[in-house]
Image (cartoon, rainbow, N blue to C red):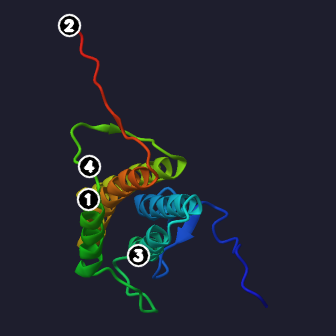
Amino acid sequence: MAFRVYTKTGDKGTTGLIGGTRVGKDSIRIEAYGTVDELNSYLGLGTDQLSDEQINEWILEIQDRLFTVGASLATDPEKAPKQKLPDLHAEDISWLEQRIDEMDDELPQMKSFILPGGSIAASTFHIARCVCRRAERICVHMQSTNEFVAEDVLKYLNRLSDFLFVLARYIVHKQGGKEIPWRPRLNA
């Protein structure tokens, strides 16, 4: 018999964590990895709008790491999983920093805040950045309520949101577009 997507085990509003523990679908842990899944989907949407092989390879790497983040968040910290799970490493965070530096080297210096936009792809990555920040805030909230979150998960999400901001700028730059600086209205 083929694997089925539906299990019917969640019909009453609960779901299983890795390790077997059942929790409500409104659990902060479910919210955290659901937001990471949403982020991953926006990254896919962003690459669907680009024909840049290098950027698309970067995003595939990040999408793979986000599955690792999701697995970490979906694991009951009180129970050892039956299978070996992938994990994040300091090198994953360094990799993001290296890509940020590579892009930054080609970008004009920012002299003001910029408004999100410039192209559909850039705007999609700005949305992904906002979703990434939300995932990070949820994980910080988890920590503040004594829910376990691996330290590298927080670092990775923090650095990833920086990467996505620079990536959106980089896409506008590579496409020959113009960034729109924020011009705050000041009452005299």
Q: Earlier in the sequence, mark 1 or mark 3?
A: 3
- The residue nearer to you, when weighing 36 against 186, is 186
**Residue under pointer 4:** 108
Kindly identify the residue that appears in the image at 27 percent across and 57 percent down: 140
Kindly identify the residue that appears in the image at 39 percent across and 70 percent down: 73
Circle on res. 157: none
Give coordinates of residue 31: x percent, y percent.
46, 58
Of tags 2 and 3, which is closer to the observer? 2
**Residue under pointer 3:** 65
Q: Residues within 10 Å of mark 1 (few under 14, many from 20)?
A: some
| Label 3 – label 4 distance at C-alpha | 29 Å
Q: Residues within 10 Å of mark 4 (few under 14, many from 20)?
A: few
Residue 40's place in the image compared with 88, above or below, is above
Kindly tell me whether residue 146 is visible in this rendering. no
Q: Residue furthest top?
A: 188
Contact check, label 1 and label 4, Cβ < 8 Å: no
Kindly identify the residue that appears in the image at 44 percent across and 72 percent down: 54
Q: Amino acid at mark 1?
A: Asp
| Label 2 – label 4 distance at C-alpha | 31 Å
Circle on res. 188: 2
**Residue under pointer 1:** 104
| Label 2 – label 3 distance at C-alpha | 49 Å
